[in-house]
Image (tube, rainbow, N blue to C red):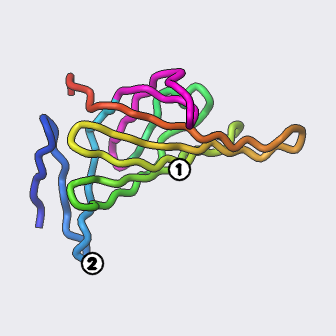
Amino acid sequence: MISLLTVGASHFMLHAAPSDAELVVLDGMVFVGHVGPVGQTANGEDEIVFQDGLFLSTSCVKYGFGSAPYETRMEGDVIVFSATVKSPKHGQIDWHGTIRGEDIQASYTWTKDRWYWFDANEEHWMKATLRKDQ
C-alpha cells in the first residue's frame, strides 16, 4: 500500500513494511539551517540532503564525508531519522534527528580515534527548515 503524507509543500512516500511499520522516504528533501556545538550558539550553516536513499551533510563533504544510507520511523506525527557518515581520514559522524512539518532538529556526534592526540568526540546540534525552492 502506497500513500502520500503531505507536509507543508513537500511529500513523503510511505510504504507498508512486513511488520506494518511505516517507512518514510525523505528523498528529494533538502533542509538548510544552523549548526553549533552542544550548549553553545550557532557557529555555522549546513544543508542536509536526502536523495536516492542516502543522507548527505554538505558542510562535511570538504572533510571527506560522503553520503550514507538513512533510516526513518514514525513517532506520531514526527519522523525520526538517523544516519552514519564516514570519512577515510576524519572518522565518522552519527546523525539523529526529528522532522516535524518543515522543521528539522538534529544532533550529531563526530568521533575519530587518534594515536597521537586525544580521541575526537564532539557533539553538535542542528536546526533547519525545508528549502523552499525544491
Seen in the picture, residue 55 relative to 42 is either above or below; the reply is below
Circles 2 and 1, Cβ within 8 Å, touching? The answer is no
- Asked which secondary structure carries label 1, the reply is strand
Q: What secondary structure is the stretch in magenta mostly built from?
A: strand
Mark 2 is on which residue type?
A: Ser
Q: Residue at x 26, y 38 (%)?
A: 28
Q: Quadrant of residue 93?
A: top right
Q: Residue at x 22, y 75 (%)?
A: 20
| Spot occupied by residue 30 in the image (x, y as percentages of width and height) | 31, 33
Look at the image and tell me in which quarter the N terminus lies.
bottom left
Name the residue tied to disc 1.
Answer: 84
Q: Nearer the viewer, residue 81 or 70?
A: 81
Q: Nearer the viewer, residue 26 or 103?
A: 103
Left or right: where does residue 120 sit relative to residue 123? Answer: right
Seen in the picture, residue 133 relative to 70 is either above or below; the reply is above
Give the magenta range: 32-53
Magenta run includes residue 87: no
Residue 26's mark? none
Mark 1 is on which residue type?
A: Thr
Name the residue tied to disc 2.
Answer: 19
| Spot occupied by residue 79 in the image (x, y as percentages of width and height) | 29, 53
Q: Residue at x 21, y 55 (%)?
A: 77
Q: Residues within 10 Å of mark 1 (few under 14, many from 20)?
A: many
Q: Residue at x 26, y 53 (%)?
A: 78
Q: Quadrant of residue 38?
A: top right
* Mark 2 and mark 1: Cα distance apart in space: 24 Å
| Spot occupied by residue 3 in the image (x, y as percentages of width and height) | 10, 58
Q: How many marks?
A: 2
